[in-house]
Amino acid sequence: MFPEISITNVVLAAGNKASEDAMTVAEVLNIISIVAFSLSLICLIVAVFFWFKYNIYKVIGDLSGRNAKKAVMKMREANEKSGKKIHRPTSAAKSRGTVTEKMKEVPSVKPQNEPEKDNNATEILSYSSGGDTMLLDEEETAANAKKQQALKENDAFEMITNIVMIHTKEVIQ
């Protein structure tokens, strides 16, 4: 009535369950690897596209100096093919003659006898009679007061804008 259960049947049943789980993990890893390889292929295609679109080969040549070397070599070859390029004066320059003369040696200029300096340049100031401060005349003080009042009333400068330079690119408005 009851099926016969033995240890071998239990081990086989456990093994089948483990093998089924192992298959699912292997399938998941297979799918992940296919997706990763697909993404890497897409990235490779995009990189090749941008390599040609932005002329990266020329950029590397500019940064390494290879393009400049090639340009200089082409110029030298073109100069060699076209013949010697020695400067020759034109007929007008020959008829005119030399425009400048050779420079003559100029004797060095020595300073002439300078007047003697006053060795007593700093000395104690002498005080005037009594050393008291003298008052200005009333006319002078009134004139100075009028000038200062006029300067305060009639400012010659009017600030239109105030610009402050700070070492930043941020603009505050």
Image (cartoon, rainbow, N blue to C red):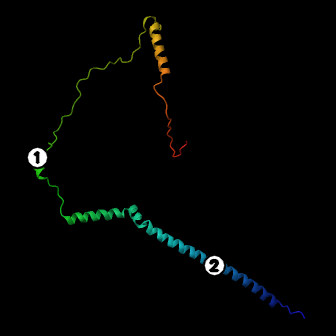
**Image quarter of residue 27:** bottom right
- Looking at the image, is mark 2 or mark 1 earlier in the sequence? 2
In the picture of the structure, the residue carrying the numbered disc 1 is: 96
Q: At label 2, which amino acid type do we have? A: Ile
22 to 88, vertically: above or below:
below
Which of the image's four quarters has the N terminus?
bottom right
Is the C-beta separation of discs 2 and 1 under 8 Å? Answer: no
Q: Residue furthest bottom?
A: 1
Q: At label 1, which amino acid type do we have? A: Arg
Q: Is residue 131 visible?
A: no
Residue drawn at x 77%, y 89% is: 12
Q: Secondary structure at mark 1?
A: helix
Q: Position of residue 85 (x, y in %)?
A: 18, 59
Residue drawn at x 47%, y 14% is: 146
Q: Secondary structure at mark 2?
A: helix
Residue drawn at x 65%, y 78% is: 29
In the picture of the structure, the residue carrying the numbered disc 2 is: 31
For residue 10, the mark is none
Residue drawn at x 49%, y 33% is: 160
Q: Is residue 164 left or right of residue 74?
A: right
Give the CA distance from mark 2 to mark 1: 90 Å
Q: Count residues near mark 1 (Cα–Cα under 10 Å), then give few for <14, some for 14-19, many for 20+.
A: few
Q: Position of residue 171 (x, y in %)?
A: 53, 44
103 to 63, vertically: above or below:
above
Camera-side residue of 82 and 16: 82
**Image quarter of residue 9:** bottom right
32 to 151, vertically: above or below:
below
Q: Count residues near mark 2 (Cα–Cα under 10 Å), then give few for <14, some for 14-19, many for 20+.
A: few
Q: Position of residue 102 (x, y in %)?
A: 15, 43
